[in-house]
Image: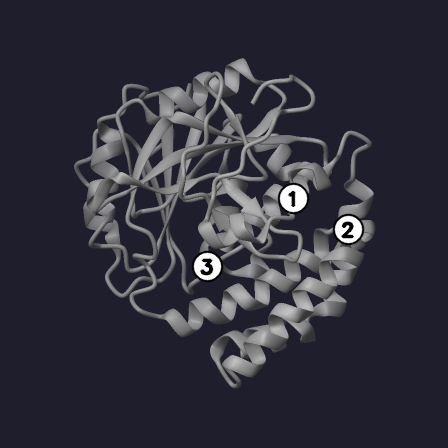
Amino acid sequence: MTAPVATARVTIAIVSYNSGATLPRCLAALAAQSEQNFRVILIDNASRERPVALIQSLPFPVDYREMDENLGFAGGMNVALEACETPFLAALNPDAFPEPAWLANLLRAADRYPHVAAFGSMQLAADNPGRIDGFGDHYLICGQAWRGRTRPPTHGDLAYSFGVCAAAALYRTGLLREVGSFDERFFCFYEDVDVAFRLRLAGAECAVVPAAVVSHVGGASFEGLSDFAAFLIARNQWWVLVKNMPLTLLCFALPGFVLLQLIGLVRHPGSARMKGLWAGLIGTAEFLKARRVVRKQRSPLANAGYWISWNPVAFLRKTALVRVDRRSGAS
């Protein structure tokens, strides 16, 4: 374990699980950053081959931690958050490769926009740099979230969205702790949507920094475990809805959510998706308790409904939705 840089402004957390094919490129991209005032925490979630050898000759310090079991992305991020001593925590997937100005542009935006709690990146497909892999996280009224696959017209250097994808994002450490950090019960998938929802309910803002660019492989750690992913997504969709959706909006959200699940049941009975939904329903009481905690943290400045989409076509087309920040008047 290498001692952290005392003057670092930001801690970059990488949660690795069987990421040997992509992690070297990710670390090399960090070594090429124009902003070098950072420390790295590498959390390995019980990979088959531990990546310890990859950090031996890096030009920056790495706090390397081996987990005895796979904690998922959420659990790994919380290990990093607990150890974080810097005002900013950046999440970076091992299959995300930042361009040299990535971190500098995120920190510049954080300095310029103190009311924003979470800053997302422009994610380009690693195998096709001309295709957008993610431009903000967006949320449909009936509980489905998506990464934007289009680049919307924006004004200025920030694009406000419902949330940001944690594959490559910058968070204000204090605010992330205030809203309860990542929910480890999610394991992975929708854990960043849950964080964004809670940040917005606390009155904070989320936005994409188009100049902060990464190339993203996407799903590299899942190695074909599509049934497991489908299970987690279906389960966690329900948990996010129950835990966070304001009551007035929940009355509109539930009919659409139920209809979509009935369609899924008819078309794919016994599928991993339906098993995930059942697991989610079993956990409803637990997340109703969590809902009470979220409600206590809600700010009078919160207006989550303003950032939730009612347009299913946008979800189907994976349209990136950005809106005017009502506080600053900027889009």
Figure label count: 3
Q: In this orientation, which residue lies closer to the viewer: 270 or 167?
A: 270
- Determine the residue located farthest toward the bottom in the rendered image: 270
Q: What's the mark number on residue 72? A: 3
Do the residues bearing badges 1 and 3 touch, measured as CB atoms within 8 Å? no
Do the residues bearing badges 1 and 2 touch, measured as CB atoms within 8 Å? yes
Residue holding disc 2? 249
Label 1: state its secondary structure. loop
Question: What type is the residue that disc 1 sits on?
Answer: Ile
Circle 3: is it few (<14), some (14-19), or many (20+) Cα within 10 Å?
A: some
- In the image, residue 30 lies at what x, y percent? 27, 32
- Determine the residue located farthest toward the left in the rendered image: 57
Residue at 43% over, 71% down: 228
The image quadrant of residue 28 is top left
Label 2: state its secondary structure. helix
Q: In this orientation, which residue lies closer to the viewer: 192 or 163?
A: 163
Judge depth for marks 2 and 3 and give the one in front.
Answer: 2
Label whose residue precedes the other's in the sequence (2 or 3): 3
Q: What distance separates the C-alpha of mark 2 from that of mark 3?
A: 30 Å
- In the image, residue 298 lies at what x, y percent? 78, 39
Residue at 41% over, 74% down: 227
Is the C terminus in the top left, top right, bottom left or bottom right quadrant?
A: top right
The image quadrant of residue 24 is top left
Is the N terminus in the top left, top right, bottom left or bottom right quadrant?
A: top left
Q: Is residue 23 left or right of residue 204?
A: left
Circle 1: is it few (<14), some (14-19), or many (20+) Cα within 10 Å?
A: many
Residue at 44% over, 16% down: 108
Residue at 52% over, 48% down: 314
